């Protein structure tokens, strides 16, 4: 991924208004979404499978029992599906018909149709297994449709409808759930990472094909948490029917690679388009984990039959259904109910719809939010939307020099640290150059460097645009910082209180409160807790906590910090998850064996913590509606970067640039490699500035709009 995206984001704050009384998104007079199109699998199949010879169909009761007229239309749920609901909210029409529907008329064509086929996937093998319509065949139907549309509205009208229409691409679940895991025919050929690459390459090719045919607004849905589907719980979740982690991890891997590929398509391949990655993994997972928060009661079983395994022909008039479908997230063992779809579609509409409004500015921020200036890589905010300051708490990943002023061995204010920093000087940053604190402030257009709060050269003016309280070696667990005599997060919190007093003296209490409420806060911590305090040589916490309990302890500390910051005035907070710690060069050397492999135990801990943190932040968001608390994923992209460095312009990812690259960090870092830009890691624990830039840019392009909506 390039360090700079050549794109601009529309600043049309007024473009869309949700009218709650009608549930319709209204566009300005000069902007339209005239049609909705769907390609993919059973989530968006409106009945195309009714007319093909396959077992993957459902034009019989109880399917469609809550559809208008109680009619089983071939939709894989009890009522309407996402294409219907999206078209309805956009005010286009109540139902999106199947392209193969014998009752389809010329009047139906200009407002959109579905070409999707239940059981289809990005992998052509997936549709072959169950004899359904592949994406390639759906593309053929789309070409045929274009010919018919030209006959109805002319070539100019057709081009306008295709350019302004919304295209939904929904696939991948069947590839993983069926072709890879259940049938297993691809496991002999691919490991999961290479299979993910196959799926993403196929998705990319398909998107480019529909672009060539006129599509410009393309919504590409992520793979959901398929391990938590009732069917996969039954097949792979053990006696307790837990969510199948291997399925969910596979989905997350594909999603991470897919989101990056879509960024690349927007930036380099598809001019004047909007190809938007739609995250359905996290909102559906939250719905499953906390059904009561959304008015549901049952999330581990479907309404049809036993709810454990019944889908398509197994869900029939003899299976029986639950007493009240509105209590269920899932209709059968694989597909959500109309009620659950409505929750998800409402989320999608409000989070993403503005991304499609202005076709002349590609990519993925909400229009209300930002545009990226290519010549200086700064995200400039709309005049009515501001992020006046950036304020950071955490550890060495974001410490910009606070440890220089502490009595600790955890400091790096000496060469070769800082060799690629401005002026080639060591500043106390744990890298060869800038660190994420600086890079985020730079891309947001706030300032080039984020100063350490303890820097004696700190000026009053610096306070108004943000400072850094982070301290290398700290963690969520107070014991972590005590061991190496650095600032704990609670020490950092006390410094923040002192900062507030100084700002109030400068601009008054009212302006300070306004400043804090609009500023962006980042919390980056936890790595040292895992690698040092828990799994380190001394293992200070192992005798007190097992792995899940220690993860819970860390999340409780993170939650307490977030709530304390909220009480002090912070409202926009990004809390970073853990990276794939088992793949750090130091951990490979210490626990990766003779081959220095990634340490699965550490990575599994990171993933467990990340999931728990995500859930806790969701809960806090519900508790504090005035706040925007965002979980920031730094696990998936770094993992892909480490596995496939060449894809991102690097050569070495299992060693650091400093010393042998296997163990050197801080005072052990004496000499360096020839070219740091070839390396993902600077020392055995921290990334190079080049790698940090890549990660920061991805974080901002996928999360910054959340803080501005």
Image (cartoon, rainbow, N blue to C red):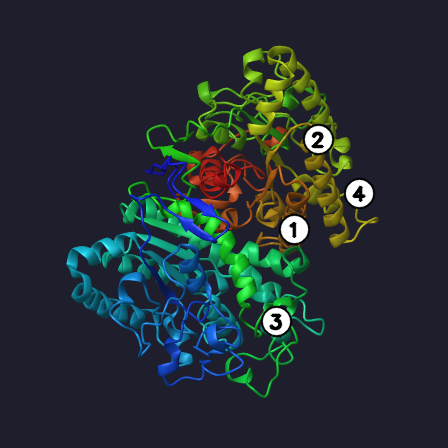
* Residue labelled with disc 3: 325
Residue that lies at the very extreme toward the front in this rendered image:
21
Disc 1/disc 4 C-alpha distance (Å): 27 Å
Q: Nearer the viewer, mark 3 or mark 4?
A: 3
In terms of sequence position, does the residue under pointer 3 or pointer 4 come before the other? 3
Mark 1, residues whose alpha carbon is within 10 Å: few (<14), some, or many (≥20)? some
Q: Between residue 92 and residue 241, name the one nearer to us.
A: 92
Mark 3, residues whose alpha carbon is within 10 Å: few (<14), some, or many (≥20)? many
- Dot 1: what SS? helix
* Residue labelled with disc 1: 615
Percent position of residue 442, x then y: 46, 27
Mark 2, residues whose alpha carbon is within 10 Å: few (<14), some, or many (≥20)? few
Disc 2/disc 4 C-alpha distance (Å): 32 Å
* Residue labelled with disc 4: 540
In terms of sequence position, does the residue under pointer 1 or pointer 4 come before the other? 4
Q: Nearer the viewer, mark 1 or mark 4?
A: 1
In terms of sequence position, does the residue under pointer 3 or pointer 2 come before the other? 3
In terms of sequence position, does the residue under pointer 3 or pointer 1 come before the other? 3
Residue at 48%, 56% in the rendered image: 255
Disc 2/disc 1 C-alpha distance (Å): 21 Å
Q: Nearer the viewer, mark 3 or mark 1?
A: 3
Above or below, 495 against 172 in this view is above
Residue that lies at the very extreme toward the right in this rendered image:
544
Q: Nearer the viewer, mark 2 or mark 4?
A: 2
* Residue labelled with disc 2: 567
Disc 3/disc 1 C-alpha distance (Å): 26 Å
Residue at 54%, 29% in the rendered image: 437
The reply to whether the C-beta atoms of the residues labelled 3 and 2 are less than 8 Å apart is no
Q: Quadrant of residue 139?
A: bottom left
């Amino acid at each position: 991924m390039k360090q700079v995206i050549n794109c601009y984001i529309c600043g049309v704050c007024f473009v869309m208004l949700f009218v709650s009384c009608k549930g319709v998104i209204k566009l300005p007079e000069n902007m339209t979404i005239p049609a909705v199109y769907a390609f993919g699998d059973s989530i968006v199949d409106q009945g195309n499978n009714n007319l093909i010879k396959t077992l993957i169909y459902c034009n019989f009761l109880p399917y469609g029992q809550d559809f208008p007229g109680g009619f089983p239309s071939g939709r894989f749920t009890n009522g309407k599906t996402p294409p219907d609901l999206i078209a309805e909210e956009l005010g286009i029409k109540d139902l999106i018909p199947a392209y193969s529907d014998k009752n389809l008329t010329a009047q139906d064509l200009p407002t959109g149709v579905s070409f999707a086929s239940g059981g289809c996937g990005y992998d052509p093998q997936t549709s072959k297994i169950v004899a359904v319509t592949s994406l390639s065949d759906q593309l053929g139907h789309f070409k045929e449709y274009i010919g018919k549309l030209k006959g109805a509205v002319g070539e100019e009208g057709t081009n306008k409808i295709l350019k302004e229409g919304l295209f939904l691409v929904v696939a991948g679940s069947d590839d993983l759930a069926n072709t890879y895991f259940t049938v297993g025919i691809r496991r002999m050929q691919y490991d999961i990472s290479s299979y993910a690459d196959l799926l993403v390459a196929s998705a990319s090719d398909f998107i480019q094909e529909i672009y060539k045919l006129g599509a410009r607004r393309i919504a590409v849905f992520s793979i959901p948490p398929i391990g938590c589907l009732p069917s996969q719980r039954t097949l792979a979740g053990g006696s307790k029917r837990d969510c199948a982690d291997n399925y969910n991890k596979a989905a997350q891997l594909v999603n991470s690679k897919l989101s990056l590929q879509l960024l690349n398509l927007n930036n380099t391949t598809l001019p004047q388009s909007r190809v938007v990655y739609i995250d359905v993994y996290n909102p559906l997972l939250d719905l499953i984990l906390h059904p009561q928060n959304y008015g549901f009661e049952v999330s581990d079983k479907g309404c049809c039959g036993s709810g454990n395994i019944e889908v398509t022909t197994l869900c029939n008039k003899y299976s029986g259904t639950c007493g009240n479908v509105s209590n269920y997230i899932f209709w059968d063992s694989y597909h959500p109910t109309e009620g659950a779809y409505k929750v998800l579609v409402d989320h999608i509409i409000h989070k993403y719809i503005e991304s499609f409004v202005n076709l002349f500015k590609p990519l993925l921020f909400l229009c209300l939010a930002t545009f990226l200036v290519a010549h200086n890589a700064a995200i400039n905010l709309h005049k009515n939307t501001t992020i006046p300051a950036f304020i950071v708490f955490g550890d060495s990943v974001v410490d910009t020099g606070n440890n220089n002023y502490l009595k600790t061995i955890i400091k790096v204010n000496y060469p070769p640290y800082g060799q690629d920093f401005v002026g080639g000087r060591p500043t106390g940053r744990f890298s060869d150059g800038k660190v994420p604190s600086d890079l985020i402030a730079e891309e947001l257009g706030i300032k080039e460097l984020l100063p350490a709060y303890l820097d004696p050269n700190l000026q009053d003016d610096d306070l108004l645009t943000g400072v850094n309280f982070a301290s290398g070696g700290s963690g969520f667990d107070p014991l972590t910082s005590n061991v190496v005599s650095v600032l704990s997060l609670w020490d950092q919190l006390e410094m923040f209180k002192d900062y507030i007093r100084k700002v109030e003296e400068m601009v008054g209490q009212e302006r300070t409160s306004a400043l804090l409420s609009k500023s962006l806060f980042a919390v980056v911590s936890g790595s040292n807790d895992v690698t040092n305090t828990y799994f380190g040589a001394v293992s200070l916490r192992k005798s007190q906590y097992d792995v899940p309990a220690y993860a819970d302890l860390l999340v409780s500390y993170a939650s307490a910090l977030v709530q304390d910051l909220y009480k002090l005035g912070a409202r926009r907070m990004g809390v970073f998850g853990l990276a794939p710690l088992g793949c750090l060069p130091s951990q490979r050397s210490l626990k990766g064996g003779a081959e220095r492999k990634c340490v699965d135990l550490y990575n599994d801990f990171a993933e467990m913590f990340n999931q728990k943190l995500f859930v806790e932040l969701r809960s806090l968001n519900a508790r504090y509606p005035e706040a925007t608390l965002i979980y920031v994923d730094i696990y998936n992209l770094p993992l892909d970067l480490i596995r496939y460095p060449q894809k991102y312009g690097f050569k070495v990812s299992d060693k650091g640039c400093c010393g042998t690259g296997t163990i050197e960090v801080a005072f052990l870092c004496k000499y360096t490699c020839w070219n740091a830009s070839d390396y993902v890691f600077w020392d055995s624990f921290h990334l190079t500035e080049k790698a940090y830039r890549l990660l920061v840019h991805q974080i901002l392009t996928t999360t910054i709009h959340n803080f501005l909506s």
